[in-house]
Image: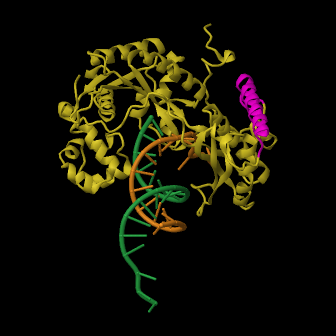
Chain colours: A yellow, B green, C orange
Amino acid sequence: MKKDILGREQKKYALVDCNSFYASCEKVFRPDLEGRPVVVLSNNDGCVVAGSKEAKKLGLTMGVPFFKMKSTIQKHQVAVFSSNYALYASLSRRVMSLLRNYGSSIEVYSIDEAFLDVSKSAQTTEVGSIIHNVIQQSTGIPVAVGIGSTKTLAKLANHVAKKNDSFSGVCELSSYKEGQKYIAHLPIDELWGIGRQHTKSLQEHNVYTIGSFMALPESYIKKKWHTPVWRIYKELQGVRCHTFIDNAPKKKGIGTARTFAKPVNTWSKLKEIVSGFIATVAVKLRNQNSCTQRLSVFVTTDKYREQNPYFGSKSICLPMPTDDTSTLIKAVLPLLKALFHDKHNYRKAGVYITDIKPNTSRQLAIGTPCSTEALEKQSTLSATIDKINQKLGKNTLVFATQRLSAKHPFDMKQTNKSQRFTTSLDEIACVS
DNA sequence: TCTGGGGTCCTAGGACCC
DNA sequence: TCTGGGGTCCTAGGACCC
């Protein structure tokens, strides 16, 4: 067995990342878009969240406000889509289920990427090529594969595979030294974990490239920056700092927030919207068999237009852990009421739950204000509601406090939404 | 009036990711 | 007119205890 410098078993990780995932999903059922720039917009058609490679060349990348790019979009006949999460989630499941065939375990890192443990393969680069071809052929989604002895190296290898056509979508980097000629010149912010702030502080110390970062002595890195930066340095040397997580861990916090297409300034409307958010997070909580004991809510006014935008948040520790929607709604409304002033035009609100525990601990709380029998009734009711909504559609059955927002969820703007080709029979692709 | 030091737990906020 | 949403991890600092 091969060992790393700490005497641990040597690992090989493959990072499989779908290219321009949302835009690629839209292209799967629209072959006429081949070669054309495609962008996908965020909720409310607010900003660009994904762009095909043709769109990226035009400067249409993640985070660009849509309204600022309208002239570019018209000029270059860019195909514009509102986000269609049902479609993306469905194609993501297909990709992930195929990937499971090529590693001893998988860590689904996000909707469009996954780490595979390929340590057992003797020919890892070949496995990478097979993955690259199979996913493209079976789903229509193009992917790049990066292989490395740490997650950071696999990420970087993936970047190299995407940027250099000569790699045909697959690149393997066992250590920084081995791949030096492909990565030393790359800007420091290409590293996984180096964002805007770290880039700025590294540049202040004359570190502009990955090469100059790796040339620094370890003691200097440890002294000047925090643990996360030092870990990146070690991972590039081939020392594993990030572990591999093969069973999706339960969420430690669950939240829902939305920007409203039109400002909200009445208590009744705000109450309904926030109650709807609670219902959403409570379903996610029950789906992972957990309950929560801490609940927060926030509201904001328009941060782009108002001179002194208002931001208010409040949180509460519940007397006992719960996963019950009505209990959570009852807890959130007084907090929301305290944040509400009718002089404000609210543009965004959200709820967040933390202090998440397994739902068995609910029964163990001492001095609970509910009897065991009442708790059992509550969970039977919740399970029934969840089942009905799962079968007949979200918001088929709602609590009275969320009734209107369930029917008209803040009038979300979605002017260019594609069909739910894979998840709704009414919207299936037709060949005529 | 003078007033130590170490440990733990909790929370808010920053930074990052996709 | 039009600027997203859902997460994780880390650190600093306050409160409290002995």
Instruction: Pinpoint residue A159: horizontal percent, then vertical percent.
Output: 32, 31
Q: In this figure, what is the number of numbered marks?
A: 0
Q: Front-most of A135 and A119?
A: A119
* Magenta-colored span: A370-396
Residue B8 higher or lower than A290, as above or below: below
Who's the residue at 70% across and 25% down the image?
A390
Task: Decide which of A398, A18 is in the foreground and name it.
Answer: A398
Image quarter (top left, top right, bottom left or bottom right) of the N terminus of chain A? top left
Residue A382 inside the magenta-drawn segment: yes
Residue ID at (54%, 25%): A88
Residue A46 coordinates in the image, percent (x, y) = 57, 41
Indicate the quadrant where residue A119 lies. top left
Q: Decide if residue A357 is on the left or right side of residue A61.
A: right
Which residue occupies the extreme top position in the image?
A432
Direction right: furthest residue:
A400
Can residue A258 be seen from the camera position used here?
no
Q: Which x, y percent locates residue A254?
A: 59, 41
Q: Is residue A213 above or below residue A162?
A: below
Q: Is residue A221 magenta?
A: no
Question: Would residue A28 appear left or right of A379 to someone viewing this image?
Answer: left
Q: Looking at the image, is A395 positioned above or below residue A300?
A: above
User: Percent from the top left, x then y, of residue A271?
Assistant: 75, 49
Q: Quadrant of residue A391?
A: top right
